[in-house]
């Protein structure tokens, strides 16, 4: 498990915000998603998910991250 700094989390949260069209009101969701992604990174700095979406720098929403 990798501990991420607030600056890293903020940067990733902003990337997520932009990736979903810069719609406001989901800042906490973006922050928590960024923390999860950075925490789950493998020790070599690469994400465990090597799918096409992550290679393009985009995220894929799962049922647990979608707002109802």
Image (tube, rainbow, N blue to C red):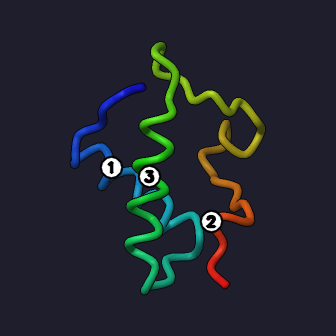
Q: Quadrant of the C terminus?
A: bottom right
Regarding mark 3 in the picture, which secondary structure is present there?
helix
Q: Quadrant of residue 51?
A: top right
**Residue at 30% across, 55% down:** 10
Residue bearing the label numbered 1: 9
Q: Residues within 10 Å of mark 2 (few under 14, many from 20)?
A: few
**Residue at 30% across, 37% down:** 4
Residue 11 placement (x, y as % from top left): 33, 52
Residue 65 placement (x, y as % from top left): 62, 65
Q: Are marks 3 and 1 in contact (CB under 8 Å)?
A: yes
**Residue at 33% across, 49% down:** 9
Q: Residue furthest top?
A: 44
Q: Residues within 10 Å of mark 1 (few under 14, many from 20)?
A: many
Regarding mark 2 in the picture, which secondary structure is present there?
loop
Disc number for residue 38: none
**Residue at 44% across, 85% down:** 24
Regarding mark 1 in the picture, which secondary structure is present there?
helix
Determine whether, in the image, residue 19 is placed left or right of residue 31: right
Determine whether, in the image, residue 38 is placed left or right of residue 66: left
Residue bearing the label numbered 2: 65
Ranked by sequence position, the earlier of labels 3 and 1 is 1
Q: Nearer the viewer, mark 2 or mark 3?
A: 2
Q: Residue furthest left?
A: 6
Q: Does residue 51 lie above or below 15 as drawn? A: above
Ranked by sequence position, the earlier of labels 2 and 3 is 3
Disc number for residue 34: 3
Gap between marks 2 and 3, in whole Å? Answer: 12 Å
Along the viewing direction, whichever of 17 and 43 lies nearer the viewer: 43
Q: Quadrant of the N terminus?
A: top left
Ranked by sequence position, the earlier of labels 2 and 1 is 1
């Amino acid at each position: 498990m990798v501990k991420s700094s607030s600056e890293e989390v903020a940067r990733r949260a902003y990337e997520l915000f932009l990736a979903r069209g810069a719609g406001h009101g989901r800042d906490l969701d973006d922050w928590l998603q960024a923390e999860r992604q950075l925490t789950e990174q493998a020790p070599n700095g690469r994400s465990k998910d090597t799918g096409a979406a992550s290679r393009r720098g985009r995220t894929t929403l799962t049922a647990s991250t979608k707002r109802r």
